[in-house]
Image (cartoon, rainbow, N blue to C red):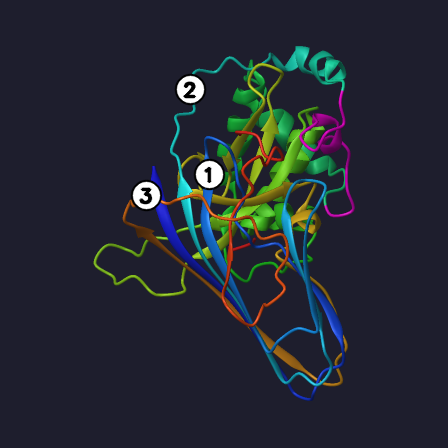
């Protein structure tokens, strides 16, 4: 297991005092039994919001909601957290043969948050993409099992696409990123999700964090780690969900810190909402992740709401959170 200390900071400046607004933050690391534990977290928001609340969305992500008063010239939101990741081996492939998968999907008699039924249909961000579907069918033609298909498509995208920061923006359609064969992790993930769905494999978009390592001989830069995105494919009743990172060409095991999952980027976007503005704004964010020493942590008290957000608040996971099973863009 590895314990990571992390800080995530968002900073905004406004040319003229803002009007009121409402913001939703999906940035808290998830609780995943047997895989990931949120040991503690503290939130700092400056200046004070008019109101704050916290809720859990349909897919199990904890969402921090803020109502911002008018008159802001800047806004800072900082998360400090400690997360334990439990490394695991991908294990033997006992996943369902692709031809049998439709029957196993049909036999899943629930529409709980992890049900494969939610992750088959196109979405506004990931529509049907004929060119991606043709590519997915070609690069997975030799795969026998569903997990083989997931890995084959992920490896092919890693091989055939180039990671290039700035090549796309958050609203670039995945079909366009695929056509130009370059993009960032959001593009890799959404293209792979669309490709898997075209094969009849339920696929989810996963948002989280990834610690980056500097080139050999170079110092580590504070704040240079990143939000990240990868893919979760449903490989049948026996195997369940399997995570694959097409940007890095690997299964997402111990180094990926998960926030949550959804049908596409919109379900897991780290910041959404609105703020009335009369002028320009500038914004920046940074992620800093360091490996921390292993120390025992006593269980904490679950804090259901952030009622004093301008002071550091300790947030602990509930003892019986059932919303995540084991299974951003750079």
**Which range of residues does the magenta coloring cover?**
110-125
Residue 115, magenta (yes or no): yes
Residue that appears at 65% across and 80% down: 281
Q: CA distance from mark 2 to mark 1?
A: 18 Å
Residue 271 image point, x, y percent: 64, 60
Local secondary structure at mark 2? loop
Q: Which mark is residue 91?
A: 2
Q: Mark 3 sits on what residue?
A: 296
Residue 211 image point, x, y percent: 39, 51
Image height of 222 relative to 99, above or below: below
In the rendered structure, which disc, 1 or 3, sits on the residue that comes first in sequence? 1
The residue mark sitting in front, 2 or 3, is 3
Residue that appears at 70% across and 27% down: 115
Residue 325 image point, x, y percent: 57, 30
Local secondary structure at mark 3? loop
**Splitting the image into 4 quarters, where does residue 26 fall?**
bottom right
The residue mark sitting in front, 1 or 3, is 3
Q: Is residue 324 left or right of residue 245?
A: right
**Splitting the image into 4 quarters, where does residue 289 fall?**
bottom left
Instruction: Count the labels in the image.
Output: 3
In the rendered structure, which disc, 2 or 1, sits on the residue that comes first in sequence? 1
Q: In this view of the protein, which residue sits in the foreground, 257 or 304?
A: 304
Q: In this view of the protein, which residue sits in the foreground, 133 or 194?
A: 194
Q: Is residue 109 left or right of residue 271?
A: right
Q: Which mark is residue 312?
A: none
Q: Mark 1 sits on what residue?
A: 36
Local secondary structure at mark 1? strand
């Amino acid at each position: 297991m590895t314990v990571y200390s992390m800080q995530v900071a968002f900073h905004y400046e406004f040319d003229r005092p803002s009007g009121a607004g409402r913001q939703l933050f999906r940035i808290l690391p998830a609780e995943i039994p047997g895989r990931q534990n949120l040991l503690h977290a503290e939130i700092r928001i400056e200046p004070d919001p008019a109101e704050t609340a916290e809720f859990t969305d349909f897919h199990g992500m904890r969402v921090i909601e803020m109502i911002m008063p008018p008159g802001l010239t800047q806004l800072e939101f900082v998360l400090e957290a400690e997360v334990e990741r439990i490394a695991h081996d991908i294990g033997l492939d006992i996943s369902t043969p692709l031809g049998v998968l439709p029957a196993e999907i049909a036999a899943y008699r629930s529409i709980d948050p992890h049900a494969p039924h939610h992750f088959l249909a196109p979405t506004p961000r990931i529509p049907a993409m004929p060119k991606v579907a043709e590519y997915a069918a070609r690069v997975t033609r030799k795969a026998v099992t569903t997990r083989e298909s997931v890995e084959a498509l992920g490896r092919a995208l890693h091989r055939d696409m180039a990671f290039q920061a700035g090549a796309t923006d958050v609203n670039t359609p995945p079909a366009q990123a695929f056509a130009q064969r370059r993009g960032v992790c959001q593009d890799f993930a959404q293209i792979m999700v669309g490709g898997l769905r075209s094969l009849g494999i339920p696929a989810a978009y996963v948002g989280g964090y990834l610690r980056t390592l500097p080139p050999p001989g170079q110092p580590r830069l504070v704040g240079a780690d990143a939000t990240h995105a990868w893919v979760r494919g449903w490989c049948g009743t026996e195997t369940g969900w399997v995570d694959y990172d097409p940007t890095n060409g690997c299964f997402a095991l111990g180094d990926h810190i998960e926030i949550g999952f959804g049908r596409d980027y919109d379900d897991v976007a780290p910041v959404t909402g609105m703020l009335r503005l009369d002028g320009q704004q500038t914004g920046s964010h940074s992620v800093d992740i360091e490996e921390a020493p292993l120390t025992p942590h006593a269980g904490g008290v679950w804090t259901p709401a952030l009622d004093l957000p301008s002071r550091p608040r300790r947030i602990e996971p509930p003892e019986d959170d059932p919303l995540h099973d084991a299974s951003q863009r750079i």
